Image (cartoon, rainbow, N blue to C red):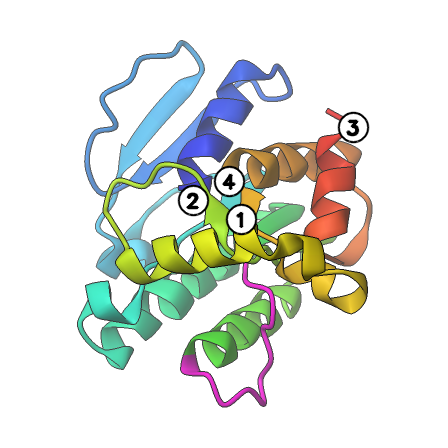
Amino acid sequence: MVGGQCLKTLLDGGAYERVVAFTRRQLGQQHPRLVETIVDFNKLEELDPFPTADVFCALGTTIEKAGSQADFLKVDFEYPRIVAERAAAAGATQFLLVSSVGADPQSSNFYLRVKAQLEKAVTGRSFESVHIFRPSFLIGSRQEFRLGETLAVAASRAVQFALVGKLRKYRPVAASTVATAMAVAAREAKPGRHIYHYDDILSLADQS
């Protein structure tokens, strides 16, 4: 969902001469600056040459959809890790990653541990700038229906007035807002490692 919004944001903007989209199937859209690259994500190591560019990574699934923790790990950790590794080796200077609020290597939650492991893998590469976005529940239209997440978003929106102080980072946020914030962060290109939660994401998006 964030990936689709991010692609739209980058194509609508004028910061890049080309926007290369790694995808498993054709997107069904036309744009003079869009370059679709159909890839087998199980063969990312064989992709050559690898683009030298700012990388916007929003890969992700659920354990339910993946079918097992092993397959979830492949999509949410292995694929993004390989993309980061290949991009850094090709000379890319910025990596922008959609992670999750609560990402923690010590978490009892498998999902949050994996997100933290990916953050560590990405920040360990030679990028000049790494931007990690940690949204809570995402608001927007998905290609597939996720009952649990839909209910969680509805519940969090209903009580978000109570999510204040340190709890504000758990407020739901629109996927389009995250995408806009990513584009702004890339444009600013601040060197170093940066982590953005709810308020940071809104602040960046307001600068678009």
Instruction: Tell me the element at label 4.
Output: helix
Mark 1 — residue?
Answer: 90
State the image coordinates of residue 106 (x, y, percent, origin top left). Answer: 58, 90
Q: CA distance from mark 2 to mark 1?
A: 6 Å
Q: Point out the frontmost of discs 3 and 2.
A: 3
**Residue drawn where x is 66% and y is 37% of the image:** 181
Circle nearer the N terminus (2, 4): 2
State the image coordinates of residue 110 (x, y, percent, origin top left). Answer: 42, 82
Which numbered circle lies on residue 207?
3
Tag 2 and tag 4, C-beta contact below 8 Å? no
Relative to 172, does residue 152 appear above or below in the rendering?
below
Mark 2 — residue?
Answer: 50
Q: Nearer the viewer, residue 203 or 52?
A: 203
Q: Residues within 10 Å of mark 3 (few under 14, many from 20)?
A: few
Q: CA distance from mark 3 to mark 2?
A: 31 Å
**Residue 103 is covered by the magenta coloring:** yes
Q: Residues within 10 Å of mark 1 (few under 14, many from 20)?
A: some
Mostly what secondary structure, the magenta segment?
A: loop
Mark 4 — residue?
Answer: 175
Relative to 60, does residue 199 appear above or below in the rendering?
above
Circle nearer the N terminus (3, 4): 4
Circle nearer the N terminus (1, 4): 1
Tag 2 and tag 1, C-beta contact below 8 Å? yes
- Horizontal arrangement in the rendering, residue 53 relative to residue 142 (left or right): right
Q: CA distance from mark 2 to mark 4?
A: 27 Å
Q: Point out the frontmost of discs 1 and 3.
A: 3
Instruction: Tell me the element at label 2.
Output: loop
Q: Amino acid at mark 1?
A: Ala
Q: Which residues are magenta?
A: 98-110
Q: Amino acid at mark 4?
A: Ala
- Horizontal arrangement in the rendering, residue 107 relative to residue 198 (left or right): left
